[in-house]
Image (spheres, helix red, strand yellow):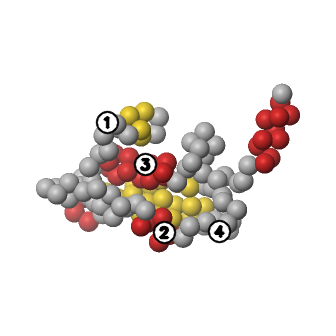
Amino acid sequence: MGDIHARDRRMKSPLRNISVTVVELPRGKFGWQLLEKQDDGAWEALAEGRTAFAHYADAMAAGLLQLQSLVSDLSAGPRQAVAARPGRRDAAEAADDEADPKTGDAQKPAGKLFGFGPLR
């Protein structure tokens, strides 16, 4: 049985090393970025949110939701496609946040999963 699992691991494409980070923006707001580790060890921006959040936790949650949207199988993680990876522009365009018209802050997605449980 162990040989079957070892064979499955060998067949998977390489795991993409993607990190969610929160950046501080002007006026005490926060934003998120997805960074991907390159073959040379440098980190390159993969995507960034377009919305400023009043709270660090909200920016982190939005970034993690964007990362989760890039993963078709959360038990296996983000895998490199056989074709070229999408560029920063493509990922950033897919990361359009819904903003609260009154505050300009992104709204928390109701009922969505955040990390290991529901977004609070």
Identify the mark nearer the N-term, 4 or 3: 3
- Badge 3 vs badge 1, beta-carbon distance below 8 Å: no
- Badge 3 vs badge 2, beta-carbon distance below 8 Å: no
- Do we see residue 17 in this rendering? yes
Give me the C-alpha separation between circle 4 and circle 2.
12 Å
Residue drawn at x 22%, y 63% is 27
Instruction: Judge by depth and name the residue closer to the eye, 33 or 109.
Output: 109
Residue drawn at x 56%, y 67% is 86
Q: Position of residue 61 (x, y in %)?
A: 38, 46
On screen, residue 113 above or below 37: above
| Amino acid under disc 2 | Asp
Q: Nearer the viewer, mark 1 or mark 2?
A: 2
Residue drawn at x 60%, y 51% is 78
Residue picked out by circle 1: 120
Q: Position of residue 9 (x, y in %)?
A: 76, 43
| Amino acid under disc 3 | Leu
On screen, residue 90 above or below 20: below
Q: Residues within 10 Å of mark 2 (few under 14, many from 20)?
A: few
Give me the C-alpha separation between circle 4 and circle 3.
23 Å
Residue picked out by circle 4: 84
Residue 65 numbered tag: 3
Instruction: Judge by depth and name the residue closer to the eye, 72 or 102.
Output: 72
Q: Residues within 10 Å of mark 1 (few under 14, many from 20)?
A: few
User: Secondary structure beneath disc 1?
Assistant: loop
Identify the mark nearer the N-term, 1 or 2: 2
User: Secondary structure beneath disc 2?
Assistant: helix
Residue 90 numbered tag: 2
- Do we see residue 23 in this rendering? no
